[in-house]
Image (cartoon, rainbow, N blue to C red):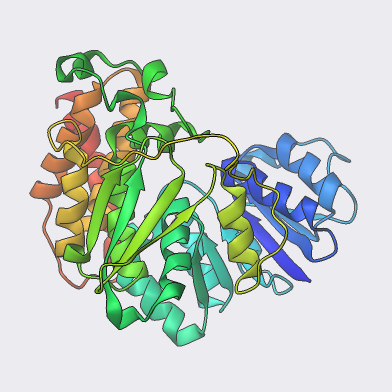
Amino acid sequence: MKRIAVLGSTGSIGTSCCDVAGAHPSSMQIVALATRSRWEDMAAQCWRFKPAFAAIADANLKARIPAGVFPPETEVAFGDDAVIRAATFPEADVVISGIVGAAGLHGTWAAVEAGKRVGVANKETLVVAGPLVMELAKKTGAEIIPVDSEHSAVFQALDCGRREDVLRIILTASGGPFRSWPLEKLQAVTPKEALAHPTWQMGPKITVDSATMMNKALEVIEARWLFDLDASQIAVAIHPQSIVHSMVEFVDGSVIAQMSPPDMKLPIQYAITFPQRATGVSPRLDFSTGFSLDFHPPDPERFPALELGFEVARRGGTSGAVLNAANEVAVARFLAGSLSFPQIARACREVLESHQFNPSPTLDELLKLDAWAREETERWTTGS
């Protein structure tokens, strides 16, 4: 029996994790849940799974939630400390970290510090503090298993050879909704257009990141630390079908790919059951019908955010925290209508270039720079 804590249980990753657990009641049990504010959705999850503990990060909601909404078997607590308690819940064997943005760092850090198996869907954790998180995992014996479809694919393909024989990894990207748009049209992209992803169903922030390819920039940085690679060993290919989720190329020229229809339940399930595999609940490829697989190099003029990822992967230090924070603010501004689509990457570059770089920061220093970068990006976007 795998006992699971789900951080961000009401988001796309969290609900997919609940679907996986619900399909395997004899081998998976949800024991703790955490959400930022969507208590109605989490209450429904609690009635379904009867976890021992549920955390709501927004402490202001405590007085607004009626009595009897949650089942009596579930203890409900409020505030950031409650989320940390869910991340370190003693009965949990596996923690699925699905809280979007830098806010997910604290819960993931706590789970790693507690020596848990951590299924990391929150890429910002490793973007902001990759070296520190991986070093902490070595000390505590925690397992960090990627849940991002691209990194899960690499994780699986690496089993096909020796690490010393890996030449490089190739992360695939759908290219988002604007991969074939004329460049001059990008200036007028609306939030509604950016949120219309052609293959994946995701939250708004991640969907915009896919449109700018900042998501792939962050994945490059994440892969640098997760797999202990040099930035020169990471490449990106546009693959519109989103069937090949990533590839590993070995020194002899063999390229091993992981393929499946685009559905997050598969990598979530594998992070829970690894090294075993269980009957899947995700759609399967149908080889009785014809389909094609296309690959193209990314256009740097169309996707300037991607080069930022490689720059940060090469440089390390404080640059990941600054890029991630700047992007979160820039995307929020774009969705609010106060920033144009091309300005997202421009704002990120200017804030990144203006920060005081430190090659070996502490976690406290990274968190302070995160706050600084958010303020700088707010000033950049408002023109002050």
Q: How many marks?
A: 0
Percent x, y of residue 314: 15, 63
Q: Is residue 9 visible?
A: no
Q: Quadrant of residue 275?
A: bottom right
Residue appearing at x 52%, y 78% in the figure: 142
Name above or below for residue 61 compared with residue 320: above
Which image quarter is the C terminus in?
top left
Is 295 situated left or right of 111 in this image? left
Q: Pick the residue in front: 144 or 170.
A: 170
Q: Quadrant of residue 229?
A: bottom left
Residue appearing at x 24%, y 74% in the figure: 251
Q: Pick the residue in front: 216 or 275.
A: 275
Percent x, y of residue 163: 34, 79
Percent x, y of residue 248: 34, 64
Q: Pick the residue in front: 317 or 60.
A: 317
Name above or below for residue 7 compared with residue 166: above
Is 180 situated left or right of 26 in this image? left
Residue appearing at x 28%, y 28% in the figure: 179
Q: Quadrant of residue 320?
A: bottom left
Q: Pick the residue in front: 247 or 141.
A: 247
Percent x, y of residue 358: 15, 66
Is 89 situated left or right of 353 in this image? right
Q: Is residue 310 visible?
A: yes
Which image quarter is the N terminus in?
bottom right
